[in-house]
Image (cartoon, helix red, strand yellow):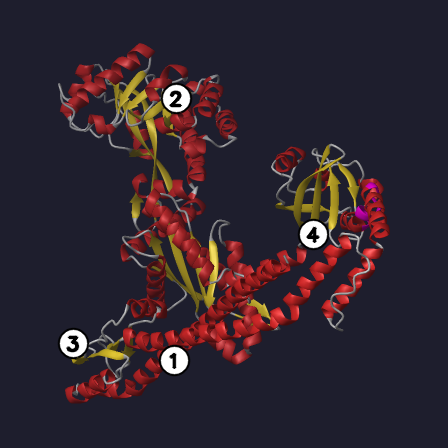
């Protein structure tokens, strides 16, 4: 039996020792091969760079002189190196000046080919040559490496290293096996025999091994322990039983843990908390007991905590982050790890929380260093490009527009050189603060370095004209705040700026392209004298400039009383004057009379239309009151005044109209307010309410340009309307039995059914008038009957006894 046991131990030793030896040998050889691979890869790259660098100047000189002989010497010398099989020199006209090639090393084995893949060398190396005074393309020196040559050399060394490593490992394993058997296996066999004799009750057996070493100590210790095994076993059993029945051990660990620990019910009720948990929340254990963990959370409500706890299992730790509220009201982030436990048939959650304020602060600092300028705190180039790229991709999909404003300070270098970098840095900080205050919230202002700032307006709508208008307005605001002096360290500094603007998206234009376009426009401003702005698109620049001039002129027109009212008569089919429409004109001091088409749209987009509309309303009612006092024809019923949607939606519009009628002592039936179809469509409920309030005062309502909207017919019967005005687009060139005539006929029939008066606008020819009469139109307005007249001319028209004959 002993012989069989000895053979069994020896066999196991031989098998495991040989296996471990071979494994270690393979690992050692593999590590050596890997290190050799790294060294060969590094040496190959360095040698290649060194070889190419040796010929850089010669190649540059050959390109500069277009010396084919010298170029051939360069390429032939390069391919003479075993690792280079192809060299080509291209001049700055993109033509091949010299080229040499030799056959590559043939593949000798699958191992060599595989090793070639491991090198992952850049086989194709292209070196640009800087040719002096050349405006053409860059000259290039192109080299291709023979990686298989390098791989073959390395493969041979690797095979030899692997073979020698394995042989060395086998030899060491054999020696180690013999020594192990002599000094370990045989004594263990004898010890096992002695143990079996002890188990059989033979206590007189001598010790099988008495040498003064570890195994001898083990035999002597076992002999002593064997004698006391009964007592030790009983004592150990008693200790384990006591430990399992006591909570002292678990409480000691929990209370002395460095992290906050909470033992909670599944409803987040805290049943037990350790010392660190109480300290973290700033409350005592008694105060925390039986409260909800959700009471101290900033991120999670009670219901949300329930959802988090439902996903926690007893087999895997669940990690989540939260914001905890301290007793003093401060908030700090924690990382919580939770697992479900079962104690005395009851399920609990053990939550270990750690304050990660320091880590979060470090992450914030890393983020700021990566994406923000350290001097001004503004986004840097990297973050700006990310946001611009996202905006470009978004607008390419939704067909909206945005803009980039490239800003460069005009006198910053002079200030920086004369007063020092400290003053310059403080000036840049002041400029950053001013830009931040004047820019919209959704915009991004970044510092690109030096005195360059770039502004992103991500959203301006789906109109190119509006985008240009918004960009020009913002550029003017920036120039305005920049024109104010800066007070820095006792110095009063003046620093203007030049701004280039590029609108996006453009066809196939990337974020970098858009920035370059804005930069190009910036240099155009510099060339024109600085302290201004320019668009990359000259046509857009002209349009924006004109709109800004109109807007600026409107402010002046309001303050200088440059607006005047003209009046166009409205004639009924019996030739009687039934009313007039008040039309605004701009009496420009330089350009003369400007009609509404030249400024109303700008006024609406800038918000000035409200103030202009209020002026028209007051002046119109003022003229009407004067005419009534002087005497009006009996047929004259009302004066029509156009009301813009923005003006109509003002909170005090109804009160303002009633106040003016009371001020000028006008009855409501003498006033007609003209509104548009689209205003009814977009604000039906509000419009209906306001119209009913004014209707009670007798005010009449007309829908202007009827037929050009979309949904007015649906709402006609729900609104207190009196008049429909047929848009001039249906009247121009109107003839019987045409599509326009059919539309007009439908409008007239609808109005007749609803009891509404119809006035046709833009009647300019007798044929148009006759067709309208034939279709049954009630009243007319247009150049055929009378052009719009200034107030004094309209008074003469009123006093005239002439009657316009319609039939």
Res. 701 mark: 2
Identify the element where label 2 is drawn.
strand
Q: Is residue 778 visible?
A: no
x, y percent for residue 681? 38, 26
Res. 609 mark: none
Quarter occupied by residue 222: bottom right
Q: Is residue 212 visible?
A: yes
Whether 533 is among the magenta residues is no
Identify the element where label 4 is drawn.
strand
Task: Identify the residue shown where x is 29% and y is 68%.
Answer: 113
How far is disc 1 from disc 3 in space, using C-alphas? 32 Å
- Which residue is under mark 1? 43
Quarter occupied by residue 574: top left
* Comparing labels 4 and 2, the label whose residue is closer to the camera: 4
How far is disc 4 from disc 2 in space, using C-alphas? 70 Å
- Which residue is under mark 3? 95
Identify the element where label 3 is drawn.
loop
Which residues lie in the magenta part? 245-252
x, y percent for residue 558? 43, 44
x, y percent for residue 192? 70, 59
């Amino acid at each position: 039996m002993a012989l069989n046991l000895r053979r069994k131990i020896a066999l196991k030793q031989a098998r495991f020792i040989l296996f471990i030896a071979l494994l270690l040998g393979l690992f050692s050889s593999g590590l050596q091969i890997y290190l050799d691979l790294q060294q060969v890869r590094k040496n190959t790259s360095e040698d290649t760079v060194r070889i190419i660098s040796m010929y850089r100047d010669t190649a540059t000189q050959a390109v500069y002189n277009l010396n084919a002989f010298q170029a051939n010497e360069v390429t032939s010398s390069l391919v003479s190196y075993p690792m280079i099989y192809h060299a080509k020199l291209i001049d700055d006209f993109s033509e091949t000046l010299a080229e040499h090639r030799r056959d590559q090393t043939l593949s000798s084995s699958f191992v060599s080919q595989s090793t070639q893949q491991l090198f992952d060398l850049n086989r194709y190396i292209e070196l640009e040559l800087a040719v002096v005074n050349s405006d053409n393309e860059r000259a290039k020196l192109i080299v291709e490496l023979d990686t298989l040559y390098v791989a073959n050399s390395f493969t041979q060394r690797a095979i030899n290293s692997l073979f020698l490593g394995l042989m060395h490992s086998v030899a060491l394993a054999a020696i180690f096996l013999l020594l192990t058997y002599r000094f370990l296996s045989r004594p263990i066999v004898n010890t096992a025999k002695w143990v079996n004799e002890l188990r059989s009750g033979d206590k007189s057996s001598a010790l099988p091994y008495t040498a003064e070493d570890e195994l001898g100590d083990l035999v002597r210790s076992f002999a002593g322990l064997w004698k006391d095994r009964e007592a030790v076993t009983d004592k150990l059993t008693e200790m384990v039983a006591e430990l399992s029945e006591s909570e002292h051990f678990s409480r000691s660990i929990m209370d002395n843990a460095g992290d906050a620990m909470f033992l909670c019910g599944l409803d987040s009720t805290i049943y037990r908390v350790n010392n660190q948990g109480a300290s973290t929340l700033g409350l005592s254990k008694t105060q925390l007991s039986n409260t909800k963990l959700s009471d101290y959370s900033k991120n999670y409500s009670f219901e949300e905590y329930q959802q988090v706890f439902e996903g926690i299992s007893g087999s895997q730790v669940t990690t989540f982050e939260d914001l905890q509220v301290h007793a003093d009201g401060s908030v700090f982030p924690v990382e919580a790890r939770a697992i479900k436990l079962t104690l005395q048939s009851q399920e609990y959650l053990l939550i270990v929380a750690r304050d990660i304020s320091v880590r979060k602060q470090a992450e914030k600092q890393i983020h700021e260093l990566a994406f923000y300028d350290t001097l001004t705190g503004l986004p840097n180039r990297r973050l700006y490009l990310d946001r611009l790229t996202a905006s470009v991709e978004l607008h390419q999909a939704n067909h909206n527009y945005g803009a980039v404003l490239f800003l460069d300070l005009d006198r910053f270098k002079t200030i920086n050189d004369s007063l020092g970098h400290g003053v310059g840095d403080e000036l840049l900080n002041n400029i950053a603060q001013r830009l931040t205050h004047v820019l919209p919230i959704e915009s991004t202002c970044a510092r690109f370095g030096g005195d360059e700032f770039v502004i992103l307006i991500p959203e301006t709508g789906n109109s190119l004209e509006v985008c240009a208008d918004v960009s020009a307005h913002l550029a003017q605001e920036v120039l305005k705040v920049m024109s104010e002096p800066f007070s820095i360290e006792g110095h009063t500094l003046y620093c203007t700026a030049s701004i280039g603007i590029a609108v996006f998206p453009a066809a196939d234009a990337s974020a970098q392209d858009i920035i370059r376009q804005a930069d190009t426009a910036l240099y155009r401003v510099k060339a024109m004298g600085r302290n201004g702005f320019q668009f990359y698109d000259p046509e857009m620049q002209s349009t924006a400039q004109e709109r800004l001039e109109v807007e600026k002129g409107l402010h002046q027109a309001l303050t200088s009383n440059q607006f005047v009212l003209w009046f166009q008569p409205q004639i009924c089919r019996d030739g009687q004057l039934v009313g007039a429409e008040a039309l605004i004109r701009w009496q420009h001091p330089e350009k003369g009379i400007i009609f509404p088409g030249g400024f109303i749209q700008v006024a609406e987009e800038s918000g000035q239309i409200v103030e202009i509309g209020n002026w028209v309303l007051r002046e119109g009612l003022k003229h009407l009151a004067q005419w009534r006092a002087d005497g009006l024809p009996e047929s004259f019923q009302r004066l029509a005044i156009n009301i813009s949607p923005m003006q109509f939606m003002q909170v005090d519009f109804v009160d303002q109209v009633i106040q003016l009628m009371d001020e000028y002592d006008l009855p409501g039936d003498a006033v007609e307010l003209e509104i548009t179809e689209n205003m009814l469509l977009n604000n039906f409920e509000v419009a209906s309410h306001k119209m009913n309030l004014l209707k009670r005062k007798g005010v009449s309502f007309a829908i202007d340009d009827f037929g050009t909207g979309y949904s007015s017919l649906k709402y006609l019967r729900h609104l207190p309307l009196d008049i429909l005005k047929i848009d001039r687009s249906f009247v121009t060139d109107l003839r019987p039995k045409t599509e326009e005539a059919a539309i007009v006929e439908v409008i007239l029939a609808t109005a007749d059914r609803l009891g509404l008066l119809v006035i046709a606008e833009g009647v300019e020819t007798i044929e148009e008038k006759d067709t309208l009469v034939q279709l049954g139109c009630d009243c007319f307005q247009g150049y055929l009957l009378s052009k719009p007249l200034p107030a004094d001319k309209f008074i003469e028209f009123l006093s005239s006894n002439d009657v316009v004959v319609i039939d």
